[in-house]
Amino acid sequence: PRAYHAAVAASAYTAALDTTTTEAYLYAIGGIDAGGTTVNTVYYSKIALDGSNGAWQTTTPLPTAIHSAGAVVFRGYIYVTGGADGQNVPTATALRAAVNADGTLGAWQPIAPLPGGAAYESLMNFGPYLYAVGGDGSTVAPMQGTTSGGEMSSTFLARVNLRTGDLASTWSPLASMSKGRSKHNSVVGGGYLFTTSGVYSGAAGSSENTYSQINADGTVGSWNGATGTNTISTLLGYDLYNETAISFVDATGKGHVLVLGGAKRQLPGRASAAVVYY
């Protein structure tokens, strides 16, 4: 069993895989086990061409145990940033590991760390640009649904060196969100960063969704908020945190954001079965 782990998939679009036998590899990174212990294990499963997945196996573990980290796959590497240790203390550590053709991972290597410790942040990539959005810099339990005062509104950018897979520079600050936010989820869709829900200051449901346009140089514009009837709070009657989200394009070419599950902020510990989309 795992909770508060990072999950990513490596496909032929993001890694050098044998596309005659393999659709993708799925990875579960770190997290908390059934006994409440934060772990450094990394599991992977082969996704066959028919979409079924094979047995889960272990591969190269993280150097240290973390939960609630961010992770993405780009050009043959898994990148992991932030997270918290077994005492819920946030870390600024950033790592990468090469995806091998058989789905195993190479050694984890340190890359430029985040500007400060951040757990419950979002990590996304748009081409060679990595974005770290929000997070909590204080010691907070994963299921806490109230604000800690350590929530961050920051957005940071790092560029991947396309030759080496390393980061070409340190993390640079971009336009910040209007409110500090953690335990949220963020996706890239239609040339925008889109962040939804989470634990943030102020009334729940206010500025619940926020988005920022990505510029040609990788920077982002000002963050704007979706309000009123365009919020999950209005639709469901409660607010979410620790939810998951994906972006996708439908058959007509229109982009969507899909938000699945999460915890109910008004009733910490109570899970939501809702699926909503924009």
Image (tube, rainbow, N blue to C red):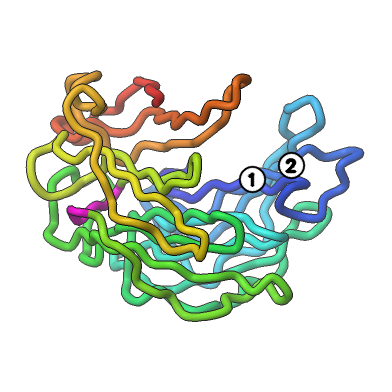
- Residue at screen point 20% across, 58% down: 151
Label drawn at residue 73: none
Q: Nearer the viewer, residue 200 or 6?
A: 200
Would you place residue 211 above or below residue 121 in this image? above
The residue carrying mark 2 is 24
Within the magenta stretch, is there residue 16?
Answer: no
The crowding category of the residue bearing disc 2, from other C-alpha atoms within 10 Å (few below 14, some 14 to 19, many at least 20), is many
* Image x and y of residue 135, in percent: 30, 58
Q: Residue furthest right?
A: 20
- Kindly identify the residue that appears in the image at 74 percent across and 42 percent down: 24
Residue at image coords 21%, 31%: 239
Is the residue 196 above or below the residue 153 in the image? above
Q: Residue furthest front?
A: 216
> Seen in the image, is 76 located left or right of residue 119?
right
Quadrant of the rendered image containing residue 107? bottom right
Write down the region rendered in magenta. 178-183
Q: Is residue 165 visible?
A: yes
Give the residue type that dot 1 points to: Ala
- Label 2, secondary structure: give it: strand
Say whether residue 26 is left or right of residue 239.
Answer: right
Q: Residues within 10 Å of mark 1 (few under 14, many from 20)?
A: many
Residue marked by disc 1: 9
Task: Please indicate, yes or no, whether residue 30 appears anywhere in the rendered image.
Answer: no
Where residue 149 appears, as percent x and y from the top left, is: 12, 60
Is most of the magenta stretch helix, strand or loop?
loop
User: Could you tell me if the residues under marks 1 and 2 are in contact, i.e. CB atoms within 8 Å?
Assistant: yes
Sequence-wise first label, 1 or 2? 1
Seen in the image, is 91 located left or right of residue 95?
left
Element at label 1? strand
CA separation, marks 1 and 2? 7 Å
